[in-house]
Amino acid sequence: MIPTQKAQQVLRDFSISSSPALSINQIFEHYNIIYDEMDYGNSNYMGSLIRAKGKTIILINTDIKNAGRINFTKAHELGHFSLNHKGQQFECSRTDMLDSTRKPLELEANQFAKEFLLPEQMVKPISMSAPFDFDTIKAISNEFVVSKLVAVFRILDFHLGNYAFIGSKHGVITHLRMSKSLVGKINILKLGASIHNKSSAYECLISNFRMTGYSSVDPKIWITRNKLGSAISLKEYSRADKLSGSVLTLLKVDFL
């Protein structure tokens, strides 16, 4: 059974109809999964699934402070369990939690977690009808108790507009995602690249500038190639968390 189908089955088996994250501990108890938290001594690790002496143990790194990230890690480890991945122990890093991971079993666990926490039948109608902005991201993040990053990625799975998301930390790009309608039409800056000092994201990071909506920017600031060849209008909407040095950037592309 593919990961999304297995996640849907778990939701049906436990009659979960809203905010699945709130039911994870109940599922752990049902399957006699021992849940605990521990200090890994390494902030790169998020959690583990351990099988030992007939018991299944799920551990979460106490270094994780964000409730949404904790829930994704729990759901990811539940994915390893529900998909019956072979192995005595899975130690999952931050990289393993990304869609870009090259580890097949970790990718499957991510697919399970995404469908379990943000089921298509619940999130797709919202994503298709609501604007792609920080109000929608916050609403989905709060309702489903997931991180804003996971909410953004799931919205873009279903949104019909030409939108892209760029996450950066201390001015370096850490996350990228485009809506399906935009994939194959443009190239944007790559992971590890520095954000442009003329971008709104950069201004938000270094000053008290706060955006309240999309604003037009030079497409060359973010787009490295236009595969369609037509003229492009680009709008940016960025929000910064100066304490962590993180910036979330939403881009709206119009082909003229």
Image (cartoon, rainbow, N blue to C red):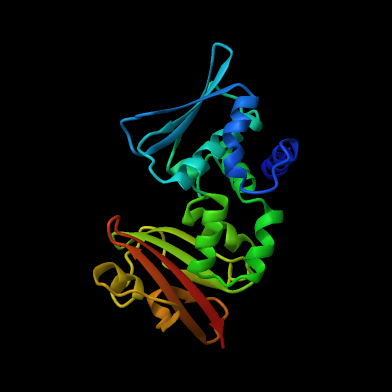
Residue closer to the observer: 59 or 85: 59
Quarter occupied by the N terminus: top right
Q: Where is residue 95 in the image (x, y as percent from the top left)?
A: 44, 44
Q: Position of residue 251 (x, y in %)?
A: 48, 73
Q: Can residue 91 be seen in this view?
A: no
Quarter occupied by the C terminus: bottom right
Compared with 219, 110 (above or below) is: above
Residue closer to the observer: 31 or 256: 31
Q: Position of residue 17 (x, y in %)?
A: 70, 47
Compared with 25, 88 (above or below) is: above
Residue at the spot 30% in from the left edge and 78% down from the top edge: 198
Compared with 221, 85 (above or below) is: above
Q: Is residue 109 visible?
A: yes
Compared with 90, 194 (above or below) is: below
The residue sitting at the left extreme is 206
Residue at the spot 62% in from the left edge and 67% down from the top edge: 159
Residue closer to the observer: 208 or 164: 208
The residue sitting at the top extreme is 53
Horizontal arrangement in the rendering, residue 98 relative to residue 158 (left or right):
left
- Place residue 22 in its image quadrant: top right
Residue at the spot 71% in from the left edge and 55% down from the top edge: 121
Q: Position of residue 34 (x, y in %)?
A: 53, 22
- Place residue 245 in its image quadrant: bottom left
Residue at the spot 34% in from the left edge and 65% down from the top edge: 240
Horizontal arrangement in the rendering, residue 44 relative to residue 70 (left or right):
left
Numbered marks: total: 0
